[in-house]
Amino acid sequence: MIWFTSDLHLGHRSVLNFCERPFETVEEMNETLIYHYNSCVRKNDTVYILGDIAHRIPVVEVNQLISRLNGKKYLCKGNHDKKYDESLFEGMYDFLEISVDGINLSLMHYPMMEWPKSRHGSLHLHGHIHTDGEYNLQQKKEGILRYDVGVDANGFYPVSIQQIKEFFEINT
């Protein structure tokens, strides 16, 4: 299975208030996000993390947290990402284009107005903006094939390629 997520912000105390996350402590947030992630992503699954894994904690601690996350991980770096242990990832990028089940996907931390093949059915998956699920519904309503995979927009869970295909009503 292929998964996407973004903006975990592990260790970031201010994100609790900034994004009105329903956790009492940063430790509760970290553990819940890791639990939700691992409840979906299996050891041999592929997951694209579209940035901002953590913020305001030492990189050694972040690497320990990342090592607890299941799957073969690819990182599209966000504005808060540091120099993580590269052995924890299959690859690290600023921008990545992939094709899954015949669907072209442009992956980046930041939302883009235009992306490769955007006028030919390509989807753009991103994070960064910490929206709720209404943003994704509004994009779809406007015919924009852009989706926020951030945890704040997806119940604090990663999103599967199957969920994205169902959301955009894509049959392959």
Image: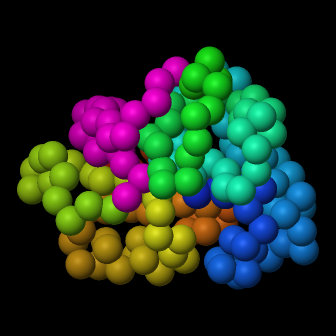
- Relative to 153, is 112 on the left or the right? left
Question: Can I make out residue 163 in this image?
Answer: no
Question: Can I make out residue 66 in this image?
Answer: yes
The residue nearer to you, when weighing 96 against 42, is: 96
Residue 150 vs 37, above or below: the answer is below
Q: Quadrant of residue 136?
A: bottom left
Question: Does the magenta portion include 107?
Answer: yes
Could you tell me residue 56's position as x and y percent? 71, 56
Q: According to the image, what is the colour scheme of the structure?
A: rainbow
- Relative to 115, is 100 on the left or the right? right
Q: What residue span does the magenta drawing correspond to?
A: 90-110
Q: Residue at x 48, y 54 (%)?
A: 79
Q: Residue at x 37, y 58 (%)?
A: 110
Quadrant location, the N terminus: top right
Q: Residue at x 37, y 48 (%)?
A: 108
Q: Residue at x 62, y 18 (%)?
A: 87
Residue extending farthest to the left is 119
The residue nearer to you, when weighing 60 against 97, is: 60
User: Dominant secondary structure of the magenta stretch?
Assistant: strand
Quadrant location, the C terminus: top left
The residue nearer to you, when weighing 49 against 26, is: 26
Residue extending farthest to the top is 87
Could you tell me residue 138's position as x and y percent? 35, 80
Could you tell me residue 127's position as x and y percent? 46, 59
Residue 40 vs 152, above or below: the answer is above
